[in-house]
Image (tube, rainbow, N blue to C red):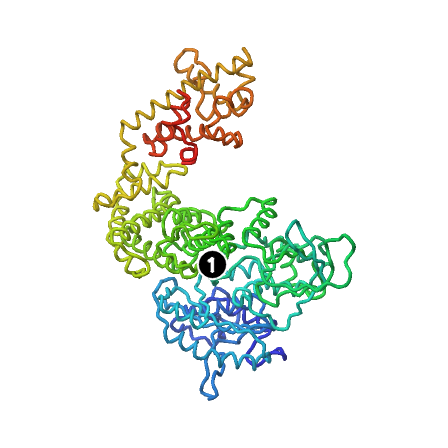
Amino acid sequence: MDSTNPANLLGPKEQISAHRARSKKHIERTVNRKEFSGQIEDGWSYSEKKYKTKIKLEKQKPNDEVFEDQVWCLFSSMGFTKMSAGRHFTLQYGKNEAEMQQIDVLAADDDVAIVVECKATKEAGKKEKGTFKKTVEAMSSQRAGIIRELKKLLKNPKLKVAFIFATKDYRLIENDKERLKSAKIHHFGENEIEYYRELADHLGSAARYQLEADLFPNQKIPNIHNEVYAIESRVGKIKCYTFSIEPERLLKLGYVLHRSRAVDTMPNYQRLIKKNRLKNIREFVEKGGYFPNSLIVNINDKVFFESLGKNIENSSSSIGVLKLPQKYKSIFIIDGQHRLYSYSDSSKAQSSTVPVVAFVKLDGDEQLKMFMDINENQKAISANLKTTLEADLKWDSDDLKQRATGLINTVAIKLGEDSNSPLFGRVMVGEDKKSDLRRISLTSITRGIKGTKLVGRFSPSEVLEPGFFYTGSNEKTLEKITTVLWRYFEDISEAAPLEWDRFQTNEGLINSPNGATALITTFGDILDFVINTKNLSDSDSTTDEIYDLCSPYIAVLGKYLNNVPSEQRAEMRRQKGGQAPLVFRRFYQKSLNIVFSDFSPEGYTEFWESRENEIVDAAKREIASIEISLKSATKSALESKFNENWEIAGIPIKVRKSANELKIEKENLSGQVVDLMDCLNLIHYRDIFLQNWEDLFKSVYIFPKSENKSKKLQTQWLDRLSRIRNDLTHQHMILPEDAKFLSAVTDWVLEDNTEKLELGGHLSG
């Protein structure tokens, strides 16, 4: 055993064989072939391995032992230099010798120690609701004594100690979550364990630095030297510092993704750090390679700069000593993750230096923009990853509107990644790929929440309209909203089991982006209706009391979803584009209106009235009139400028190609010559206008009140007109706001009556 380690703790070399044994899901033993009776004890079986003189037997480990070994192997793979030996490691927590506690897993390095209590269900894979009052209270009461003993055992009076309660297949009750939080004990479910396992596989021992940043955010790092020589300067209006630093120091101070609230928010690392690239850079560094280009970081705490001597005349820069914060998770690595993390397993981590350009206390938007600008030049960043980054970068923003975005994004991530969530495994987070089950995007959830009054409306500086569960604190609001949404989705899953388990590829509605968005917005409609009709307020009604009043409506919605009429299912699935979630929502609302006649959310009546034949027919006539007018005016204008060459010179080639293909098809069917202008779609006119805008069409077709906008915005009305025409043709419907817009455009195009068209309300509707 390593002489520098106390008894019953394994050093790095001794961990190798222990890791090999504990990573197996079965126990092995060998018996002499000659002495073997042939009788196998209960639970034992023959191993597939064959030997001449011996027989190898194996026995499946109990589920709790498998999980405990899994957790032990996880921390060992992160490079902790000291690990508990075996399953019977104990620590004394009181003065009495009998006050001893068995520790499932202990992991330590020079700065920190982590104590882990593991609990797994008896049967693997079978979810159970667990109650752990006694266990958590015992951990809490023994905490101070165990910390004291560890500092003495590891001979480090400044040792940082974290406690983790790790569970597998258990769903914790709310009271236990509160107990853990009060006792400052982190909870790791199987989702968190799997996340850190993948992280360790991806980053190697560098994963330990991210874990420590998550467990000890903003806590002082013992014995770290925090001074560097630096140049203070400015980039634009932003102050920055340029310096060199040993990778080992920066690894302890730095982190890659924000995780400021809890370790159950799991952003995706694969997009940010490529495993193969990390390996190649590490080999390059070990052979003496170096990087002249700087890492880009943001220091999110106070720094102190002491200038050294006289500055150069007319220079805006000065040289001096910069004191960095001595805290975990105080430096966010915006760019250069591979270069930094390549040193995590390198012998050069202490002797080499890396150049750094450091900004100080950039706000979330500035960090996000810088990250996007750097990374989007390499590969487009997915909407899901952007949502993940925004969740944390905007969480503590001074801008209330941005802070609300951080809150909403965090709700979406928790719904998808928390193992206790009913939507766990159904939401694409980070760079997750689609599967039969995983079809819902983070955007579809955030879009749904924004379509309700759950959070509220905000300007950068004030609350315009507080949401149903807005408390003024993101932490408390997050807890309320996630609690009520989890209960809602659980009730829907129980009331509509057939639809809940139906894949989108099998005509499923719930397990699709549009269906999920509509399910959330409809819940918002129910809440709005109940709160208004009952004159409730969040201040004098608990979340449970409000939700209980919603339950009858949720039960009706669930019953409808479990048996959606085939024609309605088909119509919802036909929907495309931005209006699709609204159509889903209207059908969901209709199922409630049939039972509760006074349930009629804003826009509900107008929507269904707009589907009546008379309104649709009138809209079709208006579209036809506009097309006739555009056809005549466009052809006349092109002929006047280009004469007989008007088709080639005036019509973009892609439009001409599309129109000619349709022209040939029509002529083959009719046997008659067809005018090219009869083969144009509304959207084609926009392309023609844009090509000839200044000379021919701007004076006639510039949209009212858009004179100071770009020509794309000046002609955007044709894009919306084209969408309305498609809805009329394929869906036989028109939304109320679109009907109003169409009527105004008809007056404008046919009669040039601009007073009837108010650009602000109609163009953006």
Q: Residues within 10 Å of mark 1 (few under 14, many from 20)?
A: many
Task: Evaluate whether residue 439 shows in this view.
Answer: no
Number of numbered discs = 1
Q: Which residue is mark 1?
A: 265
Q: Please give the name of the residue rendered at 63% of the width and 80% of the height, measured from the top-left corner.
A: 3
Image quadrant assignment for residue 480: bottom left
Viewer-proximal residue among 362 and 192:
362
Task: Evaluate whether residue 594 shows in this view.
Answer: yes
Left or right position of 285 against 162:
right
Residue 602 at x, y = what percent?
30, 42
Left or right position of 492 against 333:
left
* Amino acid type, callout 1: Thr
Viewer-proximal residue among 373 and 669:
373
Viewer-proximal residue among 252 and 497:
252
- Mark 1: secondary structure: loop
Viewer-proximal residue among 532 and 637:
532
Residue 758 at x, y = what percent?
41, 31
**Rendered-image quadrant of the C terminus:** top left
Image quadrant assignment for residue 16: bottom right
Residue 478 at x, y = what percent?
41, 58
Residue 231 at x, y = what percent?
72, 58
Question: Residue at the front extreme?
Answer: 755
**Rendered-image quadrant of the N terminus:** bottom right
Position above or below: 572 against 251:
above
Position above or below: 585 against 160:
above
Position above or below: 552 against 162:
above
Q: Please give the name of the residue rendered at 68% of the width and 54% of the height, measured from the top-left corner.
A: 294
Question: Residue at the bottom extreme?
Answer: 96
Position above or below: 762 against 330:
above
Left or right position of 547 against 51:
left
